[in-house]
Amino acid sequence: MIARLILSDGTHYEGLSFGKSGTAVGEVVFHTAMCGYQEILTDPSYHFQLVTMTYPQIGNYGVNPKDFESRRIYAAGFIIREYSPIVSHWQANRSLDDYLKFHGVVGISDIDTRALTRHLRDHGAQMGLITTSAEPLPALVEKLRGGEKLVGRDIVQEVTTGQTYAWPIGEETAPAPSKKYRVAVYDFGVKFSILRSLYKSGCELEVFPAQTPPEKILDWKPDGIFLSNGPGDPEPVDYAVASVRHLLGKKPIFGICLGHQILGLALGGRTTKLKFGHHGANHPVKHLPTGAIEITSQNHGFIVDIESLPKDLVEITHINLNDHTLEGFRHRQLSAFSVQYHPESAPGPHDSQYLFDHFIQEMKEFNA
């Protein structure tokens, strides 16, 4: 079946449909990882996005029961160059095509993803749609331009948990560490791999909805507070910014991705949207205190403006070596730090796992 990808600027591509037939709308972005499509699709940070994989052949190792980052696919749609119908992996229990169909997710293959990536790099990420409909192109472009946008919308409410729960859950059978620190997790779209990393580092975890009042967090008597990753524009998530501002200094705080942006806003900073975002598993980041270079996994379209943070309160700790944007900071007096990238990887390198150990040390010293 023929499928089309249409961008809001009128650019369009024709390819083949895979996954569910129909129409999917979202912001079109590109991801430079060579593998890890299962983790990418199930990452809540990709909610309301159409993800383009720059690696040409996708699907050859299928989908397995272990490498999920949430309970379902959150990406709005999937864009690839070549789909591999042959699955060859000892853990796989279904094909990527079957997996997309099961979750009702639209995909398109057999388009020139290199040309699409160059277009997004030159003109910026933009709204788009994948469709198997034969509706005329001008009507689809007009519908797309008049539809929902990403900027200015709070989409955290669409991915956060509806109720508090303890981690680990059913499928996590690893033995608990002997020493536990109680960590309250604000769920803005948290990945399972982040929870696994915190758990393996010695944390007892309670996951709270994004709008949980800070008083309820403190009533649980945590040793530390974690601010998770999540999708979309951080500025409309003003209730989380207010909560973090209230919690500063009361407990150690560690933020990743959207959590990093929310911490930056709580400290008086501003956020801006990148032209085409950082989405990939090979972004070089410099750790300024040591000079070490980390190869990092990233997924975000917004950043904290480095010049907006108060220099008397905030120390810059990490810088992106590609475009010199802010990748990490810490409070100079209070126990609060964050990074823009994903130290838990999944997919990606493991260069930054030390940050979880640093969080443990912060809680140890704070509660000594």
Image (cartoon, rainbow, N blue to C red):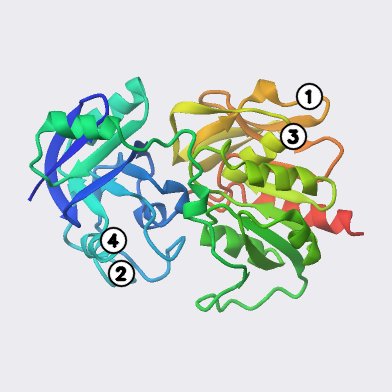
Residue 290: image x %, image y %?
73, 35
Which residue is at 46% across, 60% downward? Answer: 69
- Whether tag 1 and tag 4 are in contact, CB under 8 A, the answer is no
Secondary element at tag 3: loop
Labels 1, 2: front one: 1
Amino acid residing under circle 2 = Ala
- In front: 225, or 344? 225
- Mark 1 touches mark 3? (CB < 8 Å): no
Residue 332 visible to the viewer: yes
Image position, residue 116 (x, y; %): 25, 31
Q: Amino acid at mark 1?
A: Lys
- On the question of residue 81 being in view, the answer is no
**Where is mark 4, residue-wise?**
61
Closer to us: 306 or 139: 139
Nearest to the eye among marks 1 and 3: give it: 3
Disc number lying in front (2 or 3): 3
Q: State the CA–CA distance, disc 1 to disc 4.
A: 48 Å
Which residue is at a point 72% across and 62% down the rendered structure image?
183
Residue under label 3: 267
Residue picked out by circle 1: 311
